[in-house]
Image (spheres, helix red, strand yellow):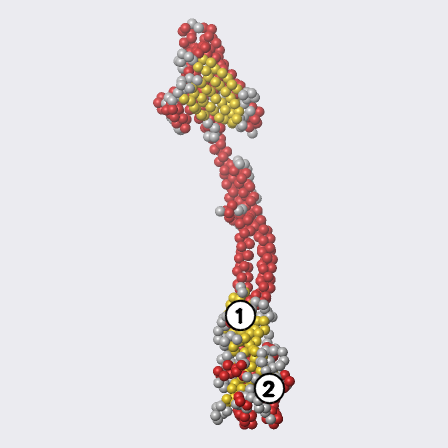
Amino acid sequence: MFISRLSLRNKIMIIFLLLIAFPLTIQGMITYYDFSSSLERRTADYTVQIADQVNRNLDRTLMELQRLSLMPLYDQQVLAILRQYSRPELRQQRPTLEEMEKMSLFISGAAYNRPEVKGIQFITGSGYIFSNVDPNLISFYIDPQKESWYPRVKEADGAFVVIPTHAPSYYFTARQSYFSVARLIREPNTNNVLGIMKIDLKLDVFIQILANLKFEDQGSFMVVNGSNELFFEENKNSFADSGELVRSGRFPNETRSDTIDIKGKKVLAVVDYSAYSGLKVISLIPIETLLKETIRLRNFTMGLAAVCLITGGLLAIYFSYRITRPLLKLKQKMFRVEQGHFNESVPVLSYDEIGQLGKGFNRMVEEINRLVNEVYVIGLREKEAELAALQSQINPHFIYNTLESINMMAVRGRNAEASEMVTALGKLLRYTVDKYDRYVLLEEELNATASYVKILQVRYGERLEVIFDIEEGLQRAMVPKLVFQPLVENAIYHGIGDREAGGTVWISAVRFEDDLLLSVRDNGRGLSEQELERIRQSLAAPAYPSSERGDRPRHGLALRNISQRIVLMYGPTYELHIDGSLGEGTAVTLTIPVSMEENHVQAVDC
């Protein structure tokens, strides 16, 4: 795991940073979302109030116009004039000047102080129009049944009706859009239709209503009826196509506020429905415009978090360094102790757990140093005793075989050869018992081995050939004492033996990187797989008691002794390796570290 490979200092820094970053992040997110939600709710509530106020103002205006449209029913002269021109066949008959003056006074009084009114028209059954509009700007006759708004009025059957934005055909001026209120005028007694009263309102009426109300700069404001027909629109954002939106039926005839999606943008939609007029006031506000203030809050929170993280990071570095510095020193001292330097100690500067750990470390190192010295001395003495015991096993075995050969030659009368053998044996005895050394020069070991070979060559004659193959520069290398002689003895007695053809023994020493390979090889009878396996198991098995030695194969004794010496002197990394096959000879190789005479002397002095 990645975290397990980090140092303690880095872990402490990460913990400090997480303890700072996590609460700041959670707090910032909660603050941001809470503020955003609160702002959205407040905006929605405020927009609902504005839409409700707009609808109330519209209702108030429409109520006044409704009362205005009922006034002709209470004026008998107006009803009489309308009754006189209520028949379609009187289309070509013009009202008298007195009648026109009466109607003009009535209409002008009704339109007085109403700047939002474009014109008030009485359209008689004959098609004649009484209006307060300049006669040069309006037609005197129309066929109401051909007008787009007429079916609404007729369907209302005398009730007050609100007509969506349209361009009346009876105005001569450039076609402008107005929205209107109208009703059929019926005679109170007979309920006969006398005509139509139609009041055209400028769209400024919406502007006047909205004048004192504040909407979002990027929002959209619409007024539609229950059939989603547009009356007024103030669109400050191109995301909203009013015609498409009102025709989509996404705004039901009820008061509500909701978040909708328009062309991939989140929009706050507020709808206020008037049961009186059937009009809906719709306000659309992009959510992103509502979050302008929250974006500033977010940026401020992120900036504050960055400052806190940087400050926290610097403090984390400082405190983690102060906390872990004693531990790092303790780690370095432990590494030194691991390398074998048992005189190390750490300064104790505090009384906390780290200080107590330092005191414990110092006590532990002192105890280890004491125990190592005791165990080292004891172990060294035990090793010396084991080496001496192993070497004592080799010497009698070797001397016994050699004296037996000299005895056989003396019996046969070969005195000169016996003399040579005695001389060679003397050299070997001086080399073996003159002084006790674990390590000797390779050159000395080879000379002693040559003396031993000379003794055997006197015995075997031309049947025995021994070849020395020593790499140049290795004569001053240090090797274990009496390492070649037992191997050569095994090769001759158990490899070549009594073969009439005799055989050859190769003694070699080569260097391979930092290792020295000492080898004794013969071309004698060799070993079977079973014999090889038995000898290898014997080399790998623990040392056996002296009482069991008679059960062991005699030719494996020397190999086992040498193998144990190598392990005792150099450790389990170095070993004796035996190989061979039946009829092809046997090869024994020792692997030991290279140690030249001068390096060995320095190591011993240390």
The answer to whether residue 159 is seen in the rendering is: yes
Q: How many marks?
A: 2
Q: Which mark is residue 244?
A: 1
- Image quadrant assignment for residue 123: bottom right
The amino acid type of the residue labelled 1 equals Glu
* Residue located at (56% from left, 78% from top): 165
Query: What is the x, y in percent for residue 181?
Result: 54, 83
Answer few, some or many: residues within 10 Å of disc 2's Cα (few below 14, many 20 plus, some between 14 and 19): some
Mark closest to the chain's N terminus, 2 or 1: 2
Tell us which disc is closer to us: 2 or 1.
2
The local secondary structure at tag 2 comes to: loop
Q: Nearer the viewer, residue 298 or 395?
A: 298
The local secondary structure at tag 1 comes to: helix
Query: What is the x, y in percent for residue 273?
Result: 50, 77
Q: Which mark is residue 140?
A: 2
Query: What is the x, y in percent for residue 93?
Result: 57, 91
* Residue located at (59% from left, 91% from top): 94
Separation of marks 2 and 1 at Cα, in angstroms:
37 Å
